Image: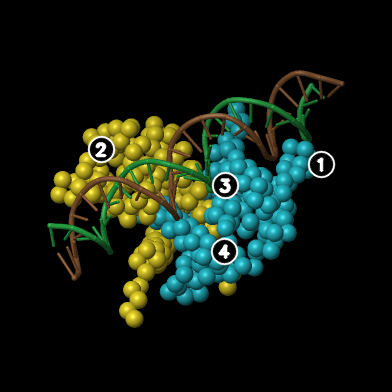
Chain colours: A cyan, B yellow, C brown, D green
DNA sequence: ACAGAATTGTTCTATATAGAACTATTATAA
DNA sequence: TTATAATAGTTCTATATAGAACAATTCTGT
């Protein structure tokens, strides 16, 4: 079968991000896509380490490190070393970041409505369960690559 | 309903691209995600203008311009002005680019198999038709934004 | 206790991506 | 015909992203 799931996904991601950033800007929220994803996971669970953010966003560790840098500069996040495990860096939301959540989620909801235009609730659920399955497959694949199977000779 | 289609899409895109680029590299194909997308549309239809590539890949025009630059340097593409409309730049595949197609598509197929692991053919089709619908919605939205409705006062 | 392995982040470098401003060309309308 | 608008790309600038190499810290087995 001729399929092109990956190509579609990439295109949608591109468009979605451009449109979402425009909507955010129109609503006075100066947050980019990468930054939004980090906030998204922190709003659910605060604080988190760099590594945890990396896993939950599927961004590479070094990417998270760099993006967090920018957000610390902007006063959105703070970083501090975990005293119990000094290899870890703990990232926390500032009060300012917390104050953005409601407005951000409103715009998010608008984006979602656009995204799923013409979908029945059932279709949405089916579609998201497909996405969740693919995400799981790909995550496992990357894990497998990073931890190659031991060679029990 | 609590949905997070956009977040999923972005995560999948991230993982998918990292894994696909690794597979390509393992098979001796030194082509990045962005470059691959441009080749993908040119293999279907060659040559194309910058603008046409932009529409078909959903990449911004300036992005296409820059990525094509790199590919011209690598001997994958050539650019020339359209003599019939000298504003346009026509991008063509080189023989080298054509020679890559078969190998690239083999790896592409591998990636696809991984991507749709555990999906029945029907599920794949359903899923891709969902993607196509979303892509259409977002494309139309961006069009609307670029060409704001005339004010017939 | 301590050498080597594993974990966790960061830095360095290169490419990808897009908005804004710009240049060149072609189309349009008066 | 010519001034203005529309179209097509490019350049400038800034951020996003990740691989590779590295540094610091903690864990493990002896």
Count neighbours of disc 3 (C-alpha within 10 A) and say few if under 14, some if 14 to 19, many if 20 or more.
many
- Element on which disc 1 rests: loop
Residue C29 appears at what percent x and percent y? 20, 69
What is the quadrant of residue C11 in the picture? top right
Marks 2 & 1 on one chain? no
Sequence order check, earlier mark of 3 and 1: 3
Marks 1 & 4 on one chain? yes
Horizontal relation, residue D19 to residue B100: left or right: right
Q: Which residue is drawn at 67% across and 56% down?
A: A42
Task: Residue A59: give its label.
Answer: 3
Marks 4 & 3 on one chain? yes
Residue A61 appears at what percent x and percent y? 61, 42
Q: Which residue is drawn at 60% across and 42% down?
A: A66
Q: Quadrant of the C terminus of chain A?
A: top right
**CA gap, disc 2 and disc 1:** 56 Å
Residue depth check, mark 3 versus mark 2: number of the one nearer the observer: 2
**CA gap, disc 4 and disc 2:** 42 Å
Horizontal relation, residue A144 to residue B23: left or right: right
State which chain disc 1 sits on: A
Sequence order check, earlier mark of 1 and 4: 4
Disc 1 to disc 4: CB gap under 8 Å: no
State which chain disc 3 sits on: A
State which chain disc 4 sits on: A
Disc 2 to disc 1: CB gap under 8 Å: no
Sequence order check, earlier mark of 4 and 3: 4
Q: Name the residue under label 2.
A: B78
Horizontal relation, residue B84 to residue A91: left or right: left
Q: Name the residue under label 4.
A: A28
Task: Residue A83: give its label.
Answer: 1
């Amino acid at each position: 079968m001729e399929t092109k799931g990956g190509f579609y996904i990439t295109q949608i991601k591109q468009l979605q991000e451009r449109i979402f950033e425009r909507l955010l800007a129109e609503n006075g929220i100066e947050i980019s896509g990468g930054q939004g994803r980090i906030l998204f996971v922190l709003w659910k669970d605060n604080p988190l380490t760099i590594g945890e953010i990396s896993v939950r966003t599927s961004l590479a560790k070094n990417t998270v490190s760099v993006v967090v840098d920018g957000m610390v500069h902007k006063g959105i996040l703070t970083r501090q070393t975990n005293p119990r495990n000094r290899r870890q860096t703990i990232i926390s939301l500032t009060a300012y970041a917390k104050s953005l959540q409601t407005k951000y989620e409103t715009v998010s909801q608008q984006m979602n409505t656009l995204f799923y235009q013409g979908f029945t609730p059932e279709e949405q659920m089916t579609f998201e369960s497909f996405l969740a399955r693919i995400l799981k497959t790909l995550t496992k694949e990357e894990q497998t690559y990073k931890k190659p199977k031991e060679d029990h000779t």
